[in-house]
Image (tube, helix red, strand yellow):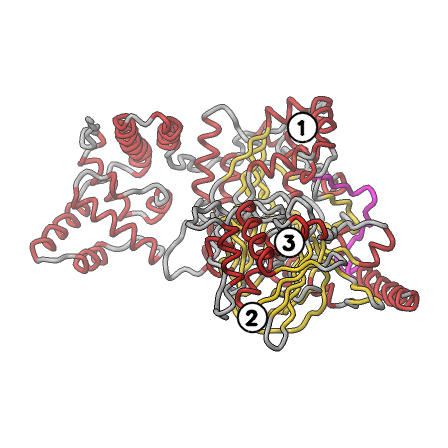
Amino acid sequence: MAQINRNNLGFLGESFQYRLAHEFMESHSFFEDLSGIVDQNMFTDPNLRTFVGVLKNYYEREDRVPSYDNMEVELRNISHTDREMETYVAVVNKVKNTPSDGVDRTKELAEKFFRQQNIIKSANEILRIAGSGDMSKYEQCVDLMNDAMTKGIHNDFGETVFDHLNETLSNDYRVPIPTGIPKIDEVLEGGLGKGELGVIIGPTSFGKVQPNDSKIATPSGFKNMGDIKVGDYVIGQNGKPTKVIGVYPHKNWQFYKVTFSDGVYTECGKEHLWAVSPLYDRRKKKDFSYKVMSLEDIMSKELRVGSRHNFKIPMADPVEFEDKEIEIEPYDYGFGLANNNGDEDRFIHHDYLYNSIEKRIELLNGIMDCKGTCMGSGRCYFRTNSKRLAEDVMTLVLSLCGFAKLTEHKRSYELEIRMQWPSIPLFKDKERQDNVKYVLLNARYIESIEKSRVCDGQCIKVEADDELYLTDYFIVTHNTSLTTAMASHAACNGFKVLQIVFEDRIKQIQRKHIGRITGVESKDLSKPQYIDKVRAAIEAFPDKEKLNENLRIVKFPSGEKTAKFIENFIKKLTNNGFKPDLVIVDYFECLKHDDNRETTNDFEREGKTMRKFEAMVGELNIAMWIPSQGTKDSINLDLVTMDKIGGSVKKAQIAHVIMSIARSVDDISNNKATIAILKNRAGGSGQVYNNVDFNNGTCRISTDNAEEHDSLFDAKERQREVRDEMARECFLLSKKDSKQA
C-alpha cells in the first residue's frame, strides 16, 4: 500500500524545522506553549529529530529549556561513537546559528506544521487500515482524522482592558448553569458559570477493603483479591459474571473476621459496607428489606437480641460458572468419589466443582445418592472421612444457593445440607428426594465479629447494577448521582452537556437518567412490573427531546486519559457540531496526569492537571464540574470540610467553587445527605444544608426539607446534638427489645 511521503512539506520543510528548533532554545515560554503537542517524530531530519527528543526530555525532567552547552552534554551522553558526537555537535551549532523569523510568525507556522504532520500520520494509518480490508475499523479511521484536525496551539496573545466592552457590560458576562438544587443555585448566583471550575468532594471508595489473600468468586473459580484487576470478571449476587471497573489497593489495613450462622466467615475492614436487614427493621416493617451499613456501625450494636440474631445478609443466587468439557459424567464422577472411603485426601477436581449449574447439580446428585441421607424430618446429611472432600461439597452446595453447615466428629466430617428450591434436587433417587424438605433461607446471620490481622488489601468496584459481588463462601458484599442530576437538569434547561465517565458504564448512567425521569429506581427499571410504567413516564416527559438533543455521555478507560486529551476531545466534539456549555469529568482520580517525570510527585502532577482544567474552562468558555474523592477518614462523616479533600491542596486553591457531600450510612439508608458550599468566588460560602433529600436510585435531590446553617461551626454543633440524641434513643430501644425478647 502506498504511503504519503512525510518529507514533502514545502515551505514547512527542513529549513523551517531548524528555525522552529532555534525558537525552542531561545524562548522558554515559546517551548512551554508548544510542549503539549511537540513530537520529535514529526521532524524529517533524523539528527534534528534526536535533538528535539533530547530537548523535550530535558524540559520534562528539569521544567526548563536547556542551554546549548547543556544540550551538548545531553547529546554526548547518548552518543556511541566520536563520529556520532560530531554529528550532534554540528546539529547544535546549526540550530544555534539559524536566523530567527520572529516568534509570532514561527508560532503561526508551527500550528500548520504540527497539524500537517498529524494529518500525514493519520492518513498513512488510514491507508494501512484500508489496505487490510477490515471495514469494521471505519470508526477508527474517522477518529484518527478528527484527532489530527484538532491538533493546534494557543494563538491568543492577550487582550486590552476594553476589548469586548459590550459583553463586559452585559448581563450575560457570566452565564450560570443551574445545578437543579434551588438553595445551591441561590448561593452560586444561578449555578456554576461558564469559565468556572467546580470541585465536588465526596466520600472516597474505601468501603469494601478485603485482604489480598481473600477469595473472590470468578466465572472460572476463586481468585485472590490481590490478583483481581480492572477488566476481570467476578460473580455478582445474581450468580452472573460482572466486570470489575475499579481496583483500589490499601497498605497495612486493619481487618476483622466476620463469622456467620452456618460457620463460614470472611475478613474485611471496619469501613466495609454490607447489605443487611436488622432485626429492629424486620419487627417494625414486617418485611425483609435490606439497607447498607458499615461493619463499624454493625459492631456498635448487639449481634443478638435475646436468642435471635440481629443482622442477616442476603444469600446469592446459584452461580453461573463457565461450562467446561469433562471426561467423566458428573453423576458418575460424584458417585465414585463419595464411594472411595480408602482415600482420606480425596477432593472434587476444579473442572467439576466450578462448572455449569446443570453439571454441578448432577455432581451433587451422584455424591448424595452414594453417601447422602434424608431423615424423616426432611433434613439431609452427608458424611465422609475426608475433610477436604467435605469442604468441597460444602462449596458445591453454597454455589447452588444452599445451606451447608460442617461439623467435625472424631473420625468423620458431617454436613447438614438444606436447599431452597425444588428445581435443584439433592438426590436422583426418587424415594429419598420425595422426603427432602425445602426451606426458603434467603439469608444467613452474622454470628460474631472479631479483630483478625493487619495486612495489605484492596477493594473493587463492579459493573453490576446493585454493585454487589461474591467473596469467599459465596458471601454477598456491597460495593454518581449528583453529577447525573446536574447534567440532566442543565440539558433539560437548554444547555449542551458533555458527561464524561471513567468507571461507570454508559448503560449505568443512562439508567440513572431514566430513573430521574420516571421516579423508578435504576435497579428496578428492567423488572417486568415496572417496564410499562417506565415507558409511559418517558413518553410523557415534557423535556424528552431537549434531554436527547442536549446531553452526550462518553466513557473512557480509567487511568488512561489526560486533561489535554479531554480538551482535544471537546474541540473535536465542537468541530462536529456539539459545543458543550457544561462538562462533567467523573472523577478526578481516574485521570492520567500529563507530567510523568520521576522527579515530580503525585501532588505536583495533580496541581498541574488542575491548572490545565482552569485554563481550559476559560479558553473554551465552558463550566466544568469535577468530582474528587475525599480522604479515607471522610467515610461516614456527617459533614465533609475542606481539609477532607484528597490529594493535592491545589485542587482547593484553583477551583472557583467547592461543594462537599456527606452521606453517613444512616443517610444512605434514609436517602439523605448533607451538602456544604466550602468555596465560592462568585459570592458567599460556608452554607451547610442538612437533611437534603438525596435518592441515589432516582438521582432526585431536593433541599425543600433541608435544615440550613449559616456556618460550618453551627452545622457541626447541631450534628453532635443529633448524634447524641440518636445514641440515647438506640440505647433505650435496645433495652426495651431485650426485655421483650
Q: Please name whichever residue, 289 or 474, is drawn nearer the observer in this view of the structure.
A: 474
Q: Which residues are magenta?
A: 698-716
Sequence-wise, which precedes: disc 3 or disc 2?
A: 2
In this image, 691 relative to 144: left or right? right
Q: Position of residue 307 (x, y in %)?
A: 83, 67
Image quadrant holding the N terminus, namely top left
Dot 1 falls on a residue whose secondary structure is helix
Residue located farthest toward the left when viewing the structure as drawn: 83
Instruction: Identify the residue position indicated by label 2 in the image.
Output: 385
Instruction: Identify the residue position indicated by label 1 in the image.
Output: 492
Dot 3 falls on a residue whose secondary structure is strand
Separation (CA) of disc 1 from disc 2 = 68 Å
Residue drawn at (64%, 73%), measured in percent from left and top? 451
Up/down of 129 relative to 93, above or below: above
Q: Magenta span has 6? A: no
In front: mark 1 or mark 2? 2
Separation (CA) of disc 1 from disc 3 = 33 Å
Dot 2 falls on a residue whose secondary structure is loop
Q: Position of residue 702 (x, y in %)?
A: 77, 41
Label 2 sits on what residue type? Asn
Q: Which mark is residue 478?
A: 3
Residue located farthest toward the front when viewing the structure as drawn: 431
Q: Please name whichever residue, 72 or 542, is drawn nearer the observer in this view of the structure.
A: 542
Q: Magenta span has 710? A: yes
Count of labels in the image: 3
Sequence-wise, which precedes: disc 1 or disc 3?
A: 3
Separation (CA) of disc 3 from disc 2 = 37 Å
Mark 1 surroundings: few (<14), some (14-19) or many (≥20) residues within 10 A: many
In this image, 99 relative to 281: left or right? left
In front: mark 3 or mark 2? 2
Image quadrant holding the C terminus, namely bottom right
Label 3 sits on what residue type? His
